[in-house]
Image (cartoon, helix red, strand yellow):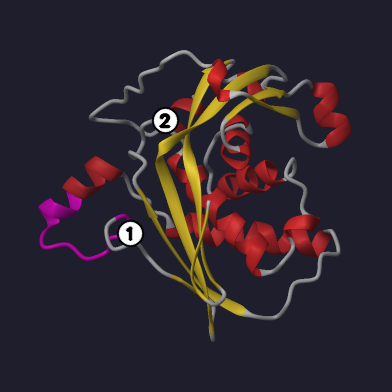
Amino acid sequence: MVVVTEKEEMERRAYARVGLLGNPSDVYGGRAVSFAVAGLWATVRLRPSDQLLVQPHPRHDLVAFPSLHALVERLDGGGYYGGVRLLLAICRIFHNHCKQNGIALEDKNFTLSYDTNIPRQAGLSGSSAIVCAALSCLLDFYGVRDKIRVEVRPNLILNAEKELGIVAGLQDRVAQVYGGLVYMDFSQEHMDKLGHGVYTPLDVDLLPPLYLIYAENPSDSGKVCST
C-alpha cells in the first residue's frame, strides 16, 4: 500500500503474518503456506531531510518513565526493545547489499519513523513487518526497486533481524513482501542454486473462514525459536 502525503514524502505498510502450514520447515528445507493479515500492520514513513534521522516511537521506544515501577511494568509487558533498532539494521543491510552488488545510491538523507498496531510478542511477525515496510521505503526513495528482485527482499529483511540476534526463518518475510496467501518451497536445491526459495502466490479465496487468536500475556517468540 502506498500513501503519498506531500512531494517526495512516502508511507509504506507491511502486514502481520500467520503461518498456516509447515512452520518452522522454512529453516529445514521444507515447504510452507502463510498469509498476511489485512487488519494488522506496521507503517513506516520516510521524508527527505538534511540529516539522516531515525525517530523513536513515542510509545514503543520509551526511555523516560514516571517511576521505577512504571519502567518495570513497561518491560514486563513489552520487553526491552522497540522499533528503532530494526530501522537502523535494515538501513545498514540495504546499504551493504547495494554496495556489494554495484547498485548506486544517490547521496541524500531522510527521516524515518514508524507505527504499528500488530500485537507485540504474539507470533504475528510484528518486528519483520516494521523492517519490511522500511525496506519498501528505501527501495522507492532511492529508486532501486527494479534492481533488487522481490525474491531477494525477504533475505534482506531476515539479515537485518539476524543482525540483532533475532532467531527466525524466511517464511514470515516472504508472506509480508508478497502479501496475500503464499506457497513457499525452501528445498536445499533451490536455496543453493538461487539463494532463496521458490515462492508462489495463491488465491486467498482458497482459504476457509479463519479466526486469529493470540495470548493476552505474550512471550518473546524469538526466545522460543532459539531453544
Q: Which residues are magenta?
A: 60-72
User: Going by the picture, which residue comes out furthest to the bottom?
Assistant: 50
Depth order, front residue of 171/220: 171
Residue at the spot x=85%, y=30% of the render?
Answer: 192
- The part of the image, by quadrant, that contains residue 55 is bottom left
Looking at numbered disc 2 in the image, what kind of residue is underneath it? Gly
The answer to whether residue 85 is left or right of residue 143 is left
Q: Secondary structure at mark 2?
A: loop
Q: Is residue 119 left or right of residue 50?
A: left
User: Rounded to the nearest whole Å, what is the CA distance between mark 2 and mark 1?
Assistant: 20 Å
x then y, percent, for residue 46: 51, 68
Give the image location of residue 36, x and y in percent. 51, 33
Magenta-span inclusion, residue 70: yes
What residue do we see at 60% from left, 55% from top? 136
Which of the two labelled residues, at mark 2 and mark 1, occupies the earlier sequence position? Answer: 1
- Is disc 1 placed on a helix, strand or loop? loop
Which mark, by number, is residue 123? Answer: 2
Q: Amino acid at mark 1?
A: Asp
122 in relation to 127, above or below: above
- The crowding category of the residue bearing disc 2, from other C-alpha atoms within 10 Å (few below 14, some 14 to 19, many at least 20), is many
* Residue 59 in magenta stretch: no
Residue drawn at x 77%, y 34% is 196
Is residue 3 placed above or below 5 in the rendered structure?
above
Of 39 and 196, the residue lying toward us: 39
Query: As rendered, which of 226 and 77 lies closer to the eye?
Result: 77
> Dot 1: within a 10 Å radius of its alpha carbon, few (fewer than 14), some, or many (20 or more) residues?
some
Q: Residue at x 24, y 30 (%)?
A: 217
Residue marked by disc 1:
61
Report the magenta stretch's main SS. Answer: loop
Q: Position of residue 220 (x, y in %)?
A: 38, 34
